[in-house]
Image (spheres, helix red, strand yellow):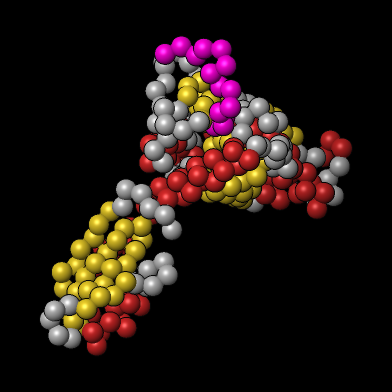
Amino acid sequence: MHLLPNTLDGRLLFAIPKKGRLHEKCLQILAGADIQFRRHARLDVCVSLNLPIALIFLPASDIPSFVGKGNVDLGITGHDVILEAKMNEHVTEELKLGFGKCALQVQVPEAGPVQNVEDLAGKRIVTSFEVLAEEYFAKLDANLNLTGDQRTKIDYVGGSVEAACSLGLADGIVDLVESGDTMRAYGLHPIATVLTTEAVLIKTRKPLSEEHEELVKVIKSRIAGVIAANKYAVCTYNIPRDKLAVAASVTPGRRAPTVSGLETEGWVAVSSMVEKNKVAAIMDELEKIGAEDILIFNLDNCRV
């Protein structure tokens, strides 16, 4: 596939992380939302086959700037990346996407003398999140009345931040932590959380055409449906009517359970959305109450 002149004219431009921790999840979101495309291996731009959209594959750290400046209309990136790029006033966070969850933490050697952030103030910090670390420690330094050369020193490195303390480059680090396994392997432990973050759908604050605003609503609705389908399943079961109130408290659904009568007198069938990560416990509880024929159905997509 070759991009011809004017290929992008009239299309909504949608930025997607081209690699890294968010990339694969974004591709799953696009597939679930039925945004069809074929991407040439050598191109970071491709057009949707079924919607007036062009996908722009960019480093996640660049997406807030592209969206904030209006070069592209929509994007997916991390909440932390938006703040680090100082673009939070230039974009709107349309939707939290429920993946890429992690914490930006202050970590120090577990066996070292520093055990809280007050101990770390005025010392050396290494980080890839220079802006957020500067803001965090500037407030801490001010609270502790540290001025001039007494203030915390922030040094930037682009990667392998967790090695900085063991190499003698820093007294502590500020970095994203998901499971914490890597930090523990380096003998580090958290003493403070700067912020928690996850992937978000963002939109430029620059004016869009009426057609593009409507298309943004469609995309947002589709993606929200994919997220809900990933979170929820449908639970159906049969229960004696006199136990319905108790069963409904176990499966209240998003609004209310759907209840219909059975041919067998005194029994009803119930259908309700339940959280996937609670399915086993819910089924156990329903069985104790007296429910029968308990079934779980996964959702491919939905609108809620």
Taking 251 as reference, is 99 above or below it? above
In this rendering, position of residue 198 left or right of residue 146: left
**Foreground residue, 22 or 106?**
22
* Residue in view at x 73 percent, y 42 percent: 89
Q: Where is residue 178 in the image (x, y as percent from the top left)?
A: 47, 43
Left or right position of 288 against 75? left
Towards the viewer: 299 or 178: 299
Residue extent of the magenta highlight: 1-14
Q: Looking at the image, which residue is at 78% across and 44% down?
A: 138
Residue 51 image point, x, y percent: 46, 33
Q: Residue at x 45, y 46 (%)?
A: 222
Q: In which quarter of the image is the N terminus?
A: top left
Residue 81 lies in quadrant: top right
Any part of residue 237 in sight: yes
- The quadrant of the image that shows the C terminus is bottom left
Q: What's the residue at 36%, 49% (across, down)?
A: 301
Predominant SS along the magenta part: loop
Regarding residue 87, the answer to whether it shows in the image is: no
In the rendered image, residue 210 lying in the magenta stretch gets the answer: no
Left or right? Give the position of 44 relative to 153.
Answer: left
**Identity of the residue furthest to the right in this view:** 148
On the image, the x and y values in percent for residue 213 come to: 60, 42
Left or right: 56 in relation to 194: left
Q: Residue furthest front?
A: 211
Is residue 276 positioned above or below 14 on the image?
below
Which residue is the extreme one toward the left? Answer: 264
